[in-house]
Image (cartoon, rainbow, N blue to C red):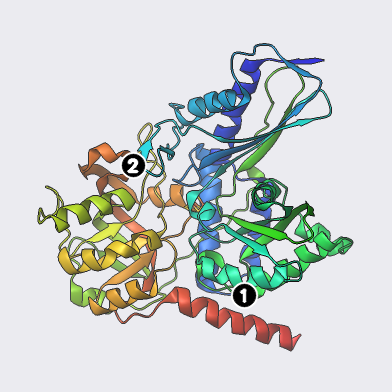
């Protein structure tokens, strides 16, 4: 019988969550580096470069890779021969205690993103608890933990289907993936769970994402099982879709496909697909009773030394003097460097603005959006001499339902976020001769370095969802929808799908 100390378990959870907040798994980074060298679409290559540079900066600075520091998801496998030194806390409570400490760490506070009463008040629990814990009793005398911090943008894109046994899983994936848009911040991975029941397939899909990136080893060795054949077929065909980094079109959408399956009912074929984003974060450890887990930091020299050249045709924009006429000359796909003042706002702030406007109360005091840009972001709290913590863009699609109101009633010139906009929103942007700019999701620490001043101007009680005024210097963005309605998220993947087909034909 091995005795595991409760405190060792809690300390290990805390350490693991701090570790994954700033260290990408090295296998993922090496796969991204490969994708970077292979990429032929300049916009997608630039996006991967920003993700890699951001990753190195986070590893060096011990600050979060992404402003969304995730929902904690933890697989705990407890050996049947394990005894706990104390029994006053359940495994769920121990994971929550480790989570609480990790997210409130004063040296590297992580963003608390969990809301209680999700169908009602949606009140932030302030310490990112509770975690999602999957507990198994297994043979042996150890405790094994696989822990991840899963971003909301990628989790939101999960797909589930109860297929007919004769249906093709490949067809379902290839049909579903383009509809998921870019809110899951590709390039990443797809975890696919097959079999069991609906909920079992979902857990398998999530657990599969804890496995290392090893598709190249599988390509080299060749597929032997049905699962391995499916992995290879999907890896090739998903990348042939041309979605590319950040949905800009390109050669790499996924760096691996992971699959787990279990037996199922003869009448059923449950399938769940969960994407993992550019901020893939997980670590594994074992406890054998000898103390807390010793999670070794990676060697920084293993991180690629990627540089990012802006090129000569970059447009520099002064946000304090920019005019509607100027905005109308910007072209979809152009890189723009923003300097000056912008306001921030995401889901909760937009909802409150909508409520105020509907009641005829106008914008809150201190908020004037005339000829201004709004940045969809919920930053991490600052530490030390930081102006703001990591502050990358959040998924713009969620703000689509507010965009017509914002453009028609506030004098707003444009928005900055990540991923695509819906067709009605693109039409609205065109009608108001506005613009939608895209920053790279998963490059939050890098983006935060362009923010020189930050102050809350409204809705302070919303915490990270408050409206801030940021003063930025040379913040890089891409024109994703221009004032004529040209849309890089529609055009890029379509162009690269054809190019990839042509490349295959030419072989
Ligand atoms: S990389 Fe994108 S999907 Fe992932 S956590 Fe960050 S913002 Fe969310």
Q: Nearer the viewer, residue 304 or 102?
A: 102
The answer to which image quadrant residue 360 occupies is: bottom left
Judge by depth and name the residue closer to the eye, 461 or 491. 461
> Residue placed at 46% from the left, 27% from the top?
105
Q: How crowded is mark 1: few (under 14 residues within 10 Å), some or many (20 or more)?
A: many
Q: Gap in Å between the C-alphas at discs 1 and 2?
A: 36 Å
- The residue that label 1 is drawn on is 241
The residue labelled by disc 2 is 464
Q: In percent of the image, x 54 and y 60: which residue is there?
A: 49
Element class at badge 2: helix
Residue 344 showing in the rendered view: no
Which quadrant would the N terminus be assigned to in this image?
top right
**Whole-percent x, y for residue 233 in the image:** 76, 69
Residue ID at (67%, 30%): 295
Of all residues, the one furthest to the top in this rendering is: 85
Q: Relative to 298, does residue 83 appear above or below in the rendering?
A: above
Q: Is mark 1 on a helix, strand or loop?
A: loop
Residue at 60% x, 28% y is 13
Which of the 4 image quarters holds residue 270? bottom right
| 139 horizontally vs 296: left or right | right
Q: Residue 294 carries which label?
A: none
The residue carrying pointer 2 sits among few (fewer than 14), some (14 to 19) or many (20 or more) residues within 10 Å by Cα, namely: many
The quarter in which the C terminus is drawn is: bottom right
Nearest to N terminus: mark 1 or mark 2:
1
């Amino acid at each position: 019988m091995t005795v595991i100390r409760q405190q060792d378990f809690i300390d290990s959870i805390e350490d693991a969550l701090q570790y994954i907040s700033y260290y990408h798994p090295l296998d993922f980074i090496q796969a991204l580096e490969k994708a970077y060298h292979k990429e032929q679409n300049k916009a997608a290559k630039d996006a991967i470069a920003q993700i890699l540079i951001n990753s190195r900066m986070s590893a060096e600075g011990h600050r979060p890779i992404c402003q969304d520091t995730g929902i904690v998801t933890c697989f705990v496998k407890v050996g049947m021969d394990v005894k706990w030194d104390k029994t006053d806390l359940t495994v769920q409570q121990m994971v929550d205690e480790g989570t609480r400490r990790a997210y409130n760490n004063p040296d590297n506070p992580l963003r608390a993103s969990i809301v209680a009463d999700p169908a009602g008040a949606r009140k932030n629990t302030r310490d990112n608890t509770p975690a999602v814990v999957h507990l198994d009793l297994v043979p042996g005398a150890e405790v094994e933990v696989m822990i991840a911090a899963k971003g909301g943008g990628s989790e939101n894109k999960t797909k589930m289907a109860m297929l007919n046994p004769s249906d093709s899983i490949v067809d379902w994936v290839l049909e579903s993936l383009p509809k998921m848009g870019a809110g899951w911040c590709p390039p990443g991975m797809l975890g696919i769970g097959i079999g069991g029941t609906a909920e079992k397939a979902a857990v398998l899909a999530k657990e599969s994402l804890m496995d290392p990136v090893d598709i190249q080893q599988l390509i080299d060795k060749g597929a032997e099982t049905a699962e391995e054949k499916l992995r290879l077929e999907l890896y090739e065909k998903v990348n042939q879709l041309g979605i590319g980094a950040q949905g800009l079109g390109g050669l790499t959408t996924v760096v691996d496909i992971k699959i787990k399956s279990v037996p199922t009912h003869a009448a059923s074929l449950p399938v769940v697909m969960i994407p993992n984003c550019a901020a893939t974060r997980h670590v594994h450890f074992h406890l054998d009773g000898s103390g807390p887990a010793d999670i070794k930091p990676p060697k920084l020299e293993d991180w690629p030394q990627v540089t990012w050249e802006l090129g000569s045709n970059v447009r520099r924009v002064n946000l304090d003097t920019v005019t509607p006429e100027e905005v109308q000359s910007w072209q979809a796909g152009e890189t723009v460097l923003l300097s000056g003042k912008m306001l921030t706002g995401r889901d909760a702030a937009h909802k409150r603005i909508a409520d105020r406007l509907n009641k005829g109360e106008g914008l809150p005091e201190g908020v004037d959006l005339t000829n201004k840009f709004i940045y969809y972001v919920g930053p991490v709290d600052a530490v030390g001499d930081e102006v703001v913590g990591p502050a990358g863009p959040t998924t713009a699609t969620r703000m689509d339902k507010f965009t017509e109101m914002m453009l028609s009633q506030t004098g707003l010139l444009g928005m900055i976020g990540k991923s695509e906009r819906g067709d009605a929103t693109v039409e609205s942007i065109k009608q108001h001769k506005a613009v939608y700019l895209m920053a790279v999701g998963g490059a939050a620490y890098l983006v935060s370095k362009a923010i020189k001043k930050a102050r809350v101007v409204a809705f302070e009680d919303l915490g990270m969802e408050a409206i801030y005024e940021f003063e930025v210097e040379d913040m890089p963005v891409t024109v994703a929808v221009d004032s004529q309605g040209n849309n890089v998220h529609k055009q890029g993947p379509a162009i690269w799908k054809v190019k990839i087909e042509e490349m295959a034909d030419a072989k």
